[in-house]
Image (spheres, rainbow, N blue to C red):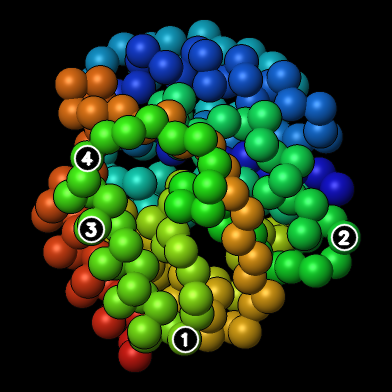
Amino acid sequence: MKLSIVIPVYNERATISEILKRVCATPYEKEIIVVDDGSTDGSREWLRTVKGKDIKVIFHENNMGKGAALRTGFGHVTGDIVIVQDADLEYNPEEYGSLISPIIDGRADVVYGSRFLGGPHRVLFFWHYIGNKFLTLISNIFTNLNLTDMETCYKVFRASLLKRISIKSNRFGFEPEITAKFAKLGCRIYETPISYSGRDYKEGKKITWKDGLAALFYIIRFRFFD
């Protein structure tokens, strides 16, 4: 199966070249769709120099948010399996094999890579951990799922689902939105442990408590409304 790896980028000049190198090194038939979301730190200029038959780079003129960048990227998917890959180095492309395995062998339509199922991870913020667990709990209540990590970047799914899902969220509301829509469709969802090399705000982390509050709104909104 062909993988479509969608990478939203916003001000990731320090890591974008390395993550592309790691994604390109994975031993799969693939296309890499990079969406620069109005970067101002040199990421945009560097991406204009990127060449490769399997790499497509798309530019937003203004910063619109992660959800908007993914929506743009999904519109260019031609593969069989979609992988959402952040442009930092928090998530390891070497783990694609375990992420796509339940889909390839026919068990799953969707796979979430969970940071809370025992994989090695960098020790960071206690309140971020509590926030993630709380949002996952509330999401589970409204979707009747038993996920351990709704907010994970690694969401992998059959590309055919894109014909049945329309992403509305522009920012980090993407995570609860797509989870709610997978649940409404009755998708077979699996989780698999992943490693996590988290970063702090000095290293470029962008999500804040405001995004956590917004996620609560989106969990409720997309349970009852599209």
Q: Which is more N-terminal, label 2 or label 4?
A: 2
- Quick check: marks 4 and 3 in contact, CB under 8 Å? no
- Nearer the observer, 215 or 41: 215
x and y, in percent, of residue 7 in the image: 51, 36
Residue at the far bottom: name it. 224
Residue ID for mark 2: 105
| In the rendered image, the vertical position of residue 23 relative to residue 152, given as above or below | above
Residue under numbered circle 4: 125
Query: The residue under label 2 is which amino acid type?
Result: Asp
Dot 4 crowding, Cα within 10 Å, few <14, some 14–19, many 20+:
few
Q: CA distance from mark 2 to mark 1?
A: 25 Å
Q: Position of residue 40 (x, y in %)?
A: 24, 20
The residue shown at (57%, 57%) is: 112
Residue 95 place in picture, x, y as percent: 66, 36
Going from N to C along the chain, the mark reached first, 3 or 2, is 2
Q: Nearer the viewer, residue 193 or 155?
A: 193
Residue sitting farthest toward the left: 210
- First-in-chain label (1 vs 4): 4
